[in-house]
Image (cartoon, grey):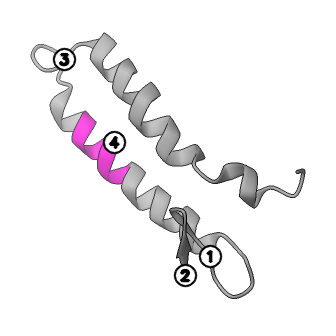
């Protein structure tokens, strides 16, 4: 079941959500590595912006729900 973008199973474990986020992150990293070449490609500042504004939110979305320290 998917609720507010978080994938839940019947035991309220977040394994499926983590797997999905890891797959999306791997695709994003692969795309960034293809776009960021040493001589040509996007600049370091653009990569840092993409990392900060796309990659980190993708990984941390729903993190407080999965922790036991609420």
Q: Which residue is mark 1?
A: 8
Q: Disc 1 and disc 2: Cα gap in Å?
A: 5 Å
In the depicted structure, whether residue 15 falls above or below residue 18:
below
> Closer to the observer: label 4 or label 2?
2
Residue 18, disc: none
Q: Earlier in the sequence, mark 4 or mark 2?
A: 2
Task: Pinpoint residue 63: horizontal percent, then vertical percent.
Answer: 68, 51
- Secondary structure under the numbered disc 3 in the rendered image: loop
Q: Is residue 12 left or right of residue 26?
A: right
In the depicted structure, whether residue 4 falls above or below residue 62:
below
Q: Earlier in the sequence, mark 1 or mark 2?
A: 2
Q: Disc 4 and disc 2: Cα gap in Å?
A: 27 Å
Instruction: Judge the density around disc 2: few (<14), some (14-19), many (≥20) Cα neighbours within 10 Å.
Output: few
Magenta range is: 26-32
Question: Between residues 26 and 59, which one lies in front from this camera angle?
Answer: 59
Task: Pinpoint residue 8: horizontal percent, then vertical percent.
Answer: 62, 76
Q: Is residue 38 left or right of residue 9?
A: left
* Residue at image point 28% right, 17% down: 46
Q: Is residue 9 left or right of residue 47?
A: right
Q: Earlier in the sequence, mark 3 or mark 4?
A: 4
Task: Pinpoint residue 61: horizontal percent, then vertical percent.
Answer: 57, 49
Question: Between residues 63 and 32, which one lies in front from this camera angle?
Answer: 63
| Residue sitting farthest toward the front | 4
Q: Which residue is mark 2?
A: 1
Q: Which residue is mark 4?
A: 29
Q: Are marks 1 and 2 in contact (CB under 8 Å)?
A: yes
Does the magenta-highlighted stretch encompass residue 29?
yes
Q: Which residue is mark 3?
A: 38
Q: Are marks 2 and 3 in contact (CB under 8 Å)?
A: no
């Amino acid at each position: 079941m998917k609720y507010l973008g978080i994938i839940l199973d019947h035991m309220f474990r977040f394994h499926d959500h983590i797997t999905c986020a890891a797959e999306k992150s791997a695709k994003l990293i692969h795309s960034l590595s293809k776009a960021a070449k040493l001589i040509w490609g996007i600049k370091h500042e653009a990569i840092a912006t993409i990392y900060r504004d796309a990659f980190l939110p993708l990984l941390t979305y729903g993190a407080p729900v999965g922790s036991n320290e609420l």
